[in-house]
């Protein structure tokens, strides 16, 4: 059965892009894959201890233990397995980043694409509200909500930051929708009387979202830094829940005795952020070439 002509160029572009991916970008993509898979399947990993289990309480372990066969990355100041806490900390960061990015993609992407295509008074009102949200200090808003709810859980963090993430996505989507709306294929669709809803979902959104995908990787990196920073300051995910920022803060207290408990979470955080940025740059360049070819 012959392959449809419309799918052949697309598949060819994808294969070409993957073949031309720089080796450093492939390493970064592989690292992100490992982080995501281990975070999702953490409960199924053999011999991985409970990240909150304090063995020294029962006289079965030592605090600040060096890396060994039983504890590949050693233990922290209360004898918890560092490797387990790094993996479960990655789960917290990924849940937070995924929820916020999904909120931006679904609500901000659709809203920005719609107002950028429709224009008129609706666009002015929406963008005015977006400017208000972007101008309001995010940290102050977060502290206000936390104080009102008297809660520092991951759900509160996701809800507040997820709401704030909608605004920048709306702005980026609107800018791309404005550019796409002036393309020849959109003008032709309007000329033949195609319904606006059909143009939006068949022409505008498919050409706006590739840019949003690459933008999302950059946003995810920023969100992971934000979650780690808030947890480090003690206003994010609360102990004993494992988080990279919380692990760095706990290791800071015993830095004069043993610096090692800080090293794995710092390494995981830095490499993950660099990997997100590297893959985002590659994806942005790939989508830019695709857009130029249209």
Image: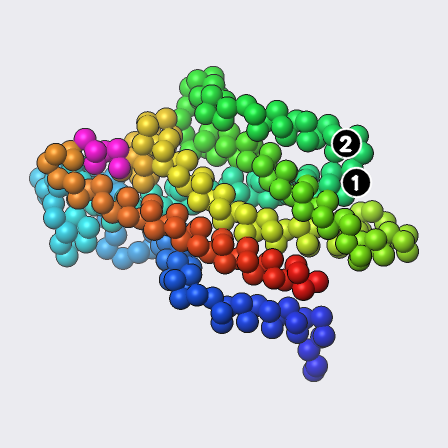
Which sits in the foreground, 156 or 200? 200
Which sits in the foreground, 266 or 57? 266
Q: Is residue 124 left or right of residue 240?
A: right
Which sits in the foreground, 154 or 203? 203
Reply yes or no: does residue 249 show up in magenta. Answer: yes
Q: Are marks 2 and 1 in contact (CB under 8 Å)?
A: yes
- Residue at the far bottom in the pictured view: 1
Looking at the rendered structure, the secondary structure element under dot 1 is: helix
Residue 261 place in picture, x, y as percent: 19, 42
Is 171 above or below relative to 203? above
* Residue at x-position 60% and y-position 69%: 13
Distance of label 2 from label 1 (alpha carbons): 8 Å
Q: Is residue 187 visible?
A: yes
> If the image is split into quadrants, where does the N terminus sit?
bottom right
Residue 148 place in picture, x, y as percent: 47, 17
Reply yes or no: does residue 52 show up in magenta. Answer: no
> If the image is split into quadrants, where does the C terminus sit?
bottom right
* Residue at x-position 22% and y-position 45%: 263
* Residue at x-position 51% and y-position 39%: 100
* Residue at x-position 36% and y-position 33%: 229
Q: Which residue is mark 2?
A: 122
Is 247 above or below relative to 273? above
Q: Is residue 57 visible?
A: no
Colour mapping? rainbow
Q: Which residue is mark 1?
A: 118
- Residue at the far right in the pictured view: 192
Q: Which residues fall within the magenta stretch?
A: 248-253
């Amino acid at each position: 059965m012959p392959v449809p002509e419309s799918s052949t160029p697309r598949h060819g572009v994808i294969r070409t892009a993957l073949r031309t991916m720089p080796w450093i970008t492939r390493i970064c993509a592989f690292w992100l894959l490992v982080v995501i898979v281990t975070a999702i399947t953490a409960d199924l990993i053999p011999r991985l201890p409970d990240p909150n289990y304090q063995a020294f309480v029962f006289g079965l372990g030592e605090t600040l233990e060096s890396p060994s066969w039983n504890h590949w990355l050693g233990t922290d100041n209360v004898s918890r397995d560092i490797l387990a806490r790094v993996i479960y900390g990655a789960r917290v960061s990924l849940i937070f980043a995924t929820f916020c990015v999904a909120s931006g993609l679904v609500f901000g992407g659709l809203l920005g694409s719609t107002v950028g295509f429709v224009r008129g008074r609706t666009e002015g009102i929406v963008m005015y509200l977006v400017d208000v949200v972007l101008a309001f200090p995010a940290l102050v808003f977060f502290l206000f909500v936390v104080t009102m709810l008297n809660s520092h859980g991951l759900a509160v963090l996701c809800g507040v930051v997820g709401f704030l993430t909608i605004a920048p996505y709306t702005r980026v989507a609107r800018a791309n929708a404005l550019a796409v709306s002036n393309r020849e294929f959109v003008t032709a669709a309007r000329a033949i009387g195609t319904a606006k809803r059909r143009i939006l979902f068949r022409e505008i959104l498919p050409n706006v979202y590739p840019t949003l995908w690459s933008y999302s990787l950059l946003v995810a990196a920023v969100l992971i830094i934000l979650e780690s920073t808030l947890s480090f300051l003690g206003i994010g995910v609360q102990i004993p829940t494992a988080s990279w920022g919380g692990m760095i803060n706990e290791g800071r207290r015993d830095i004069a005795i043993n610096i090692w408990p800080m090293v794995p979470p710092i390494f995981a955080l830095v490499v993950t952020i660099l990997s997100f940025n590297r893959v985002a740059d590659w994806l942005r360049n790939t989508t830019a070439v695709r857009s130029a070819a249209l």
